[in-house]
Image: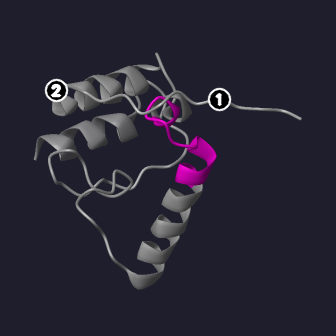
Amino acid sequence: MPVEWSPPKFESVNPWQDAQTDVMETRAGFTTLKEQISKRGYNAEEVITEIEEANRLLDEKGIVLDSDPRRVTRQGMFQTEQSDDPPPAGSDDQSAQSDEQKD
């Protein structure tokens, strides 16, 4: 029978700074979201499923929370619609997006 072990939740002395570090590590590709969730003592599959269900319900109701990174930036601004594929480097689409972000 396969077994997956998670360490007990880490009690932080400075939770805000630790959370900022975790975000930077995940965004830089040094760790995965699953690793970050697991190191807090939670089952990553269960947490991700809960997030998926909550996002689906919020979307159905047309609710956008300030904490939703799919919709809002860290500065509280609405995300611009982006395709799954980034525009090629130096393309007009990329320049237009940069100009929009400056405004």
Q: Range of the magenta residues?
A: 37-48
Question: How many numbered badges does the structure rendering display?
Answer: 2
Q: Give x and y (percent) for residue 84.
A: 54, 45
Q: Give x and y (percent) for residue 29.
A: 47, 20
Badge 1 vs badge 2, beta-carbon distance below 8 Å: no
Q: CA distance from mark 1 to mark 2?
A: 25 Å
For numbered disc 2, what is the local secondary structure?
loop
* Residue type at numbered disc 1: Trp
Q: Compared to 68, does 33 lie above or below?
A: above
Residue 91 position by quadrant = top left
Q: Compared to 93, does 88 lie above or below?
A: above
Residue 52 position by quadrant = bottom right
Residue at x 43%, y 34% (from the top left corner)? 40
Quadrant in which the N terminus appears? top right
* Residue found farthest to the front: 8
Residue at x 35%, y 35% (from the top left corner)? 94
**In front: label 1 or label 2:** 1
Q: Is residue 56 magenta?
A: no
Q: Give x and y (percent) for residue 5.
A: 65, 29
Front residue of this view, candidates 81 and 76: 76
In the rendered structure, find residue 50 and report the number of the disc placed on it.
none
In the rendered structure, find residue 5 and report the number of the disc placed on it.
1
Q: Which residue is denoted by mark 2 in the rendering?
A: 14
Q: Earlier in the sequence, mark 1 or mark 2?
A: 1
Q: Is residue 47 magenta?
A: yes
Compared across the picture, whether 13 is left or right of 26 comes to left
> Badge 2: few (under 14), some or many (20 or more) residues near its Cα, within 10 Å?
few
Residue at x 20%, y 47% (from the top left corner)? 100
* Residue type at numbered disc 2: Asn
Compared across the picture, whether 93 is left or right of 34 comes to left
